[in-house]
Amino acid sequence: QEWAASQRLSLARRRREMPVGEQYKLVNPSALPDPETSELPNGVFKTVKDAVKSGPGVPIVLLPGVYEEVLLIEGGEQLVGLKAARVLLAEGGGEDLPELKEGEEDGECVILGTSFHTVSFLGDGTLEGLTIRQRGSGKWFGVHCASGSPVIKGCVLDGATSSCLGVCGGATPAVNDCTIQHSFTGCGVCVFDGGLGTFEGNTITDNSRSGVEASGEETSVTLTNNAIFKNHGDGVLLCDKASCTMTGNKVYNNWHCGVEARDEATLTAEENEVTANNFGVLVGRQATAQLTGNTVHGNFFTGIDVSKRNKDKEDDEAVTTIANNSVKYNLECGVKLWFDAAAKLDGNTVYANLQEIKLTPRSRRHVEYGKVEE
């Protein structure tokens, strides 16, 4: 035990003696240069941009504060707030991270852009434990992913003159455990022109338009275990042939629909909770959906609303499947099929709505029923 303790002490001593630049890079706007060389210590930078320009390799750690900068990341650089860095580097190199006064370490590490997208990804890279804001004139994203596979983890994307996060051009970000809120004119997340991505465990709220919007034929997103609420449009909006897979999300208190698919979009939704929106799930204008095992309760108008099938496709491709869902307490009707809709209903519980199932004459011809519970 004494030998093991001495080895740990020796390892900790060696790490403390290692230059900062070998374990991580530190952004410290208050750093002072060496009086003899007039150079900053190795691995220390006064701006985030200078640290990024120095190239990838080790994490770039930001001290709490506001950094008014616009950043381009394309070489795998990893930007980490100090609090997150203590966890990230706990197994190697984190012992000599700066010690701050009590309460200071809980301060935000804010990157603030005022003239362009605050952070632009043209390749791989990571943001972790940071707050990203975009202000000023024009319409810009807080974070713009144009290519690569960025990782955005444990961040707060807090407001932008357009959407908080924009994804396009085949970029495939992984966005986990973030708060995405307060866009001024756009959405929380806007995925377009072939953008892809996975979004898991995020809170997406209080955005000017929809919480998540996906558009474009090659655009596809996966939403898992997110809370999407109090957005001023839809919780999730799919249009223009975009596709989306949703699993385990809570979508509630959005101004228009919880989930809307239209204009030949494709929706696959399983085991989501869609509650207390004006409309629960709306599938229209030649969109198709597979709705399985969802809870659609307490929406102001309809729970599930399907209209206008795609006549240009084969019948089996044009059908929306509604299976094993719980559709209750919606104030107009539980399931509404109208304007030449086509749907398969199987094993749903539709109960305690003002009207359980509403069919218009043209839609009645295209509806197929599976098992009907007593």
Image (cartoon, rainbow, N blue to C red):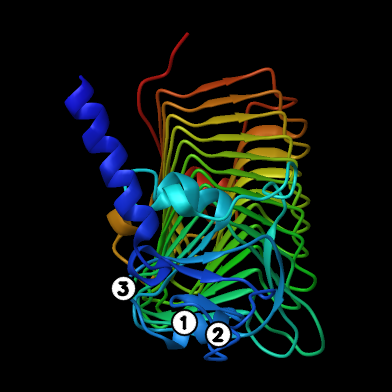
Mark 2 and mark 3 lie on one chain; the one further toward the N terminus is 2
Which residue is depicted at the point 35% across and 68% down?
58
Mark seen at residue 49? 2
Q: Is residue 366 visible?
A: no
Q: Pointer 2 and pointer 3: residues touching (CB < 8 Å)?
A: no
Which residue is depicted at the point 34% across and 77% down?
56
Packing grade of label 3 (10 A; few <14, some 14-19, many >=20) is some
Residue 195 found in image quarter: bottom left
Assign a secondary structure to mark 3: loop
Assign a secondary structure to mark 1: helix
Q: Pointer 3 and pointer 1: residues touching (CB < 8 Å)?
A: no
Q: Nearer the viewer, residue 36 or 137?
A: 36
Label 2 to label 3, Cα distance in Å?
Answer: 15 Å
Q: Is residue 258 visible?
A: yes
Question: Which residue in the rendered view is the most extreme toward the front?
Answer: 36
Q: Specify the amino acid type for callout 3.
A: Gly
Which residue is depicted at the point 46% across and 36% down?
248
- Which residue has dot 3 on it? 57
Q: Pointer 2 and pointer 1: residues touching (CB < 8 Å)?
A: yes
Q: Nearer the viewer, residue 95 or 126?
A: 95
Mark seen at residue 52? 1
Q: Nearer the viewer, residue 254 or 327?
A: 254
Packing grade of label 2 (10 A; few <14, some 14-19, many >=20) is some
Question: Which residue in the rendered view is the most extreme toward the top?
Answer: 374
Packing grade of label 1 (10 A; few <14, some 14-19, many >=20) is many
